[in-house]
Image (cartoon, rainbow, N blue to C red):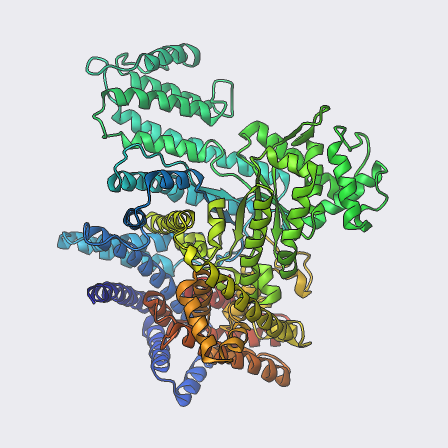
Amino acid sequence: MQTLEKERDSSMSLRRDVKALGNILGEVLLHHGGPELLEKVEKIRVTTKKLRNEYDEGTYKALKQEIANLKAPMRQQVIRAFSVYFHLINAAEQNHRIRRRREYQLQEGEMAQPGSIESAVVSLKNKQVDEETIQQVLDELSLELIITAHPTEATKHSVLEIQKQIASLLQKLDQPQLTSKERKELEDGLVNEVTILWQTDELRHRKPTVMDEVRNGLYYFDQTFFDVLPEIHQELEEQLKENFDSSSWKVPNFLHFGSWIGGDRDGNPNVTPEVTWETLHKQRNLALKKYKEIIVQLMKRFSHSTERVVISKELVDSVEKDEAKYMENGQAWAVEAEIYRRKFAVMLKRLEETGKSAIGYQDAAELLDDLQLIEDSVKSHQPVDREWKALGKLIRQVQLFGFHLASLDVRNHSGEHEAAITEILKKVQLADDYASLSETEKQKVLEDVLNDPRPLLLLNEDYSEETQEMLKVFQMIKNAHDEFGRNAITVYLISMTESASDLLEVLVLAKEAGIYRVHADGSVETHLNVAPLLETVDDLIAGPEIMETLFRMECYSSHLKKHGNQQEIMLGYSDGSKDGGTLTANWRLYRAQQEIHDVAKKFGLGLKFFHGRGGSLGRGGGPLNRSILSQPPETLGDGVKITEQGEVLSSRYLLEDIAYRSLEQATSTLLESTVDNTIGFVAGNELEEKEWRSILEDISNVSLKKYQSLVFGDPDFLTYFHQATPLNELGALNIGSRPMSRKNRNRFEDLRAIPWVFAWTQSRQLLPAWYAAGTGLNSYASESAGHLHQLQEMYEKWPFFRSTVDNLQMALLKADITTAKEYAALVEDEEIADRIFGNIVEEYNRTKEVLLKITGNQELLDNTVNIQESVHRRNPYVDPLNLLQVNLIKELREQEDPDDDLLVEALLTISGIAAGLRNTG
């Protein structure tokens, strides 16, 4: 009861902020558009809120007419008013997350915040887990988050910056000891930021280049990751020391961020080897800049004098040696007794020259050695258990980020490799037409090549432009290893992996660049992990057999030994969902992990599953900690790798406090779940889960049949999709450097999952996030009361099933059938519209009904009030944007030569709805 009261009080603070920001927006509208604009927006707002509270057909028709009567330029102003409101709500909610975290921190000693590192460590203590077991888990713990440039962030970076400023001002206004003058200044600041937001163009006027995307990605390393990652490690170490007897805890560097931005070539011709090379340079430059900034600050604080403390002989000797070797006359620190400052001065000089001359550090290990010398000396005169945290933090930063900042994954489509190999093998007369060979024949040819120390390429032979480009990619990787270190690029990902030969082809290409080598004595040298990406339902089913085939090959086994017998496997959440529906895709992903894990265990190999999750529910989205919980528990100890993309980056990592909260939730979940699995704490569910898996297999099969009967079985489905969503208009939004389809064709299989999901979300149908799940679940639940009870028990006890059901609830809550009907009316053939939309409505109702029975909720997401309230808060303001979008799309499609101003208005509605619904693509 007390917790509910606190939640209610906290929610009141959020409503206060939203109301205050809404009032400021009203002032801005009045100033820029006069009373007419404010009255029009207010009239629409009041009507939509009234309809959401109590639907009335007459009021709805009046609202539609009011919106239909809007004409330019008033119409664009109304669109912008509702869009800007969402940016304000987003800022208020971000601040509210920070506020709730602080409220828990202020209750120190009462109760740790759920999902915090403190709560996880206390839980381990309460379970009486011994220190040796915890340290063992820590030593194997691995969480890697990979930022990508997937085009789902519709909000411009400049708008996100304003949002960040507004959230910061709200945070300051929460301080209790503000003077009236300070409060007035902060309130004036809010008015200024909302005014700037109104005066800022929300739309990009050109597509971002890959380097634009690289700069956007680096922003998060600069502003957030560089500080938050070491703080997470530090907090875990401190909580362990505080709650357990041992003081010698050693928390390894288990949490890393990597990147695809500048390395993801799949379907993006703009990612060239030259672009990847430039990306690596920019990453190194940022890492060096951060280290220099930190060392300058440390120099100010390390004023220790040899007149007051004893400095270690090793440090003194190193300073004298370094000054003679690296510093010219007049460059050394002037005060001889200030040894630490003298050392830092040398380090700054060397950092400045890194990558430029022989004076610079050759690798991050040399910098780390210097820092370790300083730390060892400081410990000799610093009070025990009072470490110099700023220095320790820098050491952790160098360990985490090195000079490469983030490991850059390179990804390409399997078909590109096959085409290059086919041409190369024909030139050297090893296979006249490699692509037409059977899979067994391909494997034999490739194994022979990999076992042969001799190169394949003919020095004076001309290859096609495509093959030359492919060879350049691998030569660039070899050069990157030499220039930036092998951690700069560690993994090569293969999209659309369908067979074992897809991985062997990449090893052959790596061999030709010298990244993979076979010596005359048969020994293997290999410096690049090769990871399959299993995406479609068929590929997920075939995955275990593909990996077993590879693990049995002597050449591949030798390759894995050089990588610590560790295999990385990426799982795609987008294409499987697009091909088979969300329930079937998630179940196939779960099964594939278990089966591949069993295969690897048989061969004594370790695995790291790389989860290619999107921001949207239809692409595996959801809270980071829930993503971890939804995996088979036995795979958590293998290491977890997850993509963080598009709008997820800004929602999780724009503000440092929210970034910390998101990462500590993920850390606490992974730590506690892995320990539980290690000690057998969850073993009691083993027999139950075996039965549950059988149940879900049957449910999945029914769901798959239902999904494919619509998407592939109805000949008019693609017509409906193109006409009942803003798919065709999305291409003009300029939110990413990558084309909407892999080959710029209109076939379903070539359409990327992102625009597929984005378009369905905009139209409030959200079909990829829930469709066919209801039929599958209901087919089992309706057979008997006992079956329904089993599903309820699965929801209660099985994290995977609970996560799946909760994501379905969220999808249905964000979907809106009344609004979706307006989009269905855009379909030219009324019979097609009625038939397919009728099918969607019927399945929506069926899904909602069975979910409420399984969860025991009265309404969707009754068990997650914060999310439920957020959706309800936004819905009345998304509704008018949807109605405006439908009208604009209709007008645009009726014009032979679409009007530019009309298109801009349509794009503004897309941007506004994306801001309102948040996880859009």
Q: Is residue 867 visible?
A: yes
Compare residues 195 and 402 and report the one nearer the observer: 402
Q: Position of residue 443 (x, y in %)?
A: 75, 44
Q: Position of residue 309 (x, y in %)?
A: 21, 16
Q: How many marks?
A: 0
Q: Is 516 drawn above or below residue 16 in the view shown? A: above
Compare residues 105 and 176 and report the one nearer the observer: 105
Q: Which residue is drawn at the image coordinates 51% and 70% (left, top)?
A: 770
Q: Which residue is drawn at the image coordinates 46% and 81% (left, top)?
A: 69
Q: Is 258 drawn above or below residue 293 in the view shown? A: below
Q: Is residue 906 visible?
A: no
Compare residues 486 and 834 and report the one nearer the observer: 486
For the N terminus, which image quadrant? bottom left
Q: Position of residue 696 (x, y in %)?
A: 53, 67
- Name of the residue lying farthest toward the bottom: 58
Q: Is 635 drawn above or below residue 456 in the view shown? A: below
Q: Position of residue 751 (x, y in %)?
A: 64, 62
Name the image quarter holding residue 385.
Answer: top left
Q: Is residue 181 left or right of residue 514?
A: left
